[in-house]
Amino acid sequence: MLKHPPKTVIAGPVGRLDTIVVAPETPPSGIAVICHPNPLQGGTHSNKVVQTAAKALSQMGYVCYCPNLRGVGESEGLHDHGVGEVDDVLAVVAHARSLHGDLPLALAGFSFGGFVAARARERVTSDKLLLMGVAVGKYAIPTPPVPADTLVIHGEKDEVIPLSAVLDWARPQALPVIVFPGTGHFFHGRLVPLAQTIQRCW
């Protein structure tokens, strides 16, 4: 886990976005934007699941941007329950592309961040989508359908987003879900297998 990852400030639609950047050791072969869990429950870009995904993807050549979305930490604006946050993600994507060109794009998120990433995918084409503990059925806006190759990972014993809710969302899409047996929402004690699963199934 990165203890002091480098940070940058990105101009968002309602002000600056405080962003952690996890870069690969080689010139990047892709861009990933990874969204954090619900800030009303303490979620930020330093969340362990977010940083685990960033480390895993950076080892695969992605330069990873982990923004604090609006109203979180040092980012400006007010929390918007997954609406304005989509615009924040698109601003981070635009910033990354201005630096790295038109590299393959991955969108990812944990919990609330997965909900935001899935909604952002409706407005920007990404080559990959990673949803971990995705917050299905938690917000007034439904979680949209996603591409067939989306990587969905969920804990069997998730106490925040029941696995049954995710399966009910995935079933009409014939969308596979990778289930971590006996695992709760925050993947406690399962972060290394989470990273390995992301890399193996990517």
Image: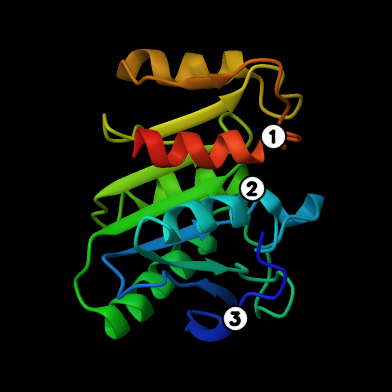
Give the answer, above or below, for where 121 lies relative to 99.
Answer: above
**Label for residue 49?**
2
In which image quadrant can residue 4 be found? bottom right
- For the rendered model, the colour scheme is rainbow
Q: Which mark is residue 6?
A: 3
Pointer 1 local density, CA inside 10 Å: few below 14, some 14–19, many at least 20: many
Which sits in the foreground, 37 or 28? 28
Residue at (34% x, 62% y) in the render = 61
In the rendering, at what x and y percent does residue 174 appear? Answer: 31, 15
Say above or below: 135 vs 37: above
Q: Which residue is under mark 1?
A: 187
Residue 72 picture quarter: bottom right
Asked if labels 2 and 1 touch by Cβ distance under 8 angstroms, the answer is yes
Q: Is residue 157 above or below residue 121?
A: above
Q: Amino acid at mark 3?
A: Pro
Q: Position of residue 24 (x, y in %)?
A: 41, 69
Q: Secondary structure at mark 1?
A: loop
Q: Residues within 10 Å of mark 3 (few under 14, many from 20)?
A: few
Give percent across and percent down for residue 74.
72, 80
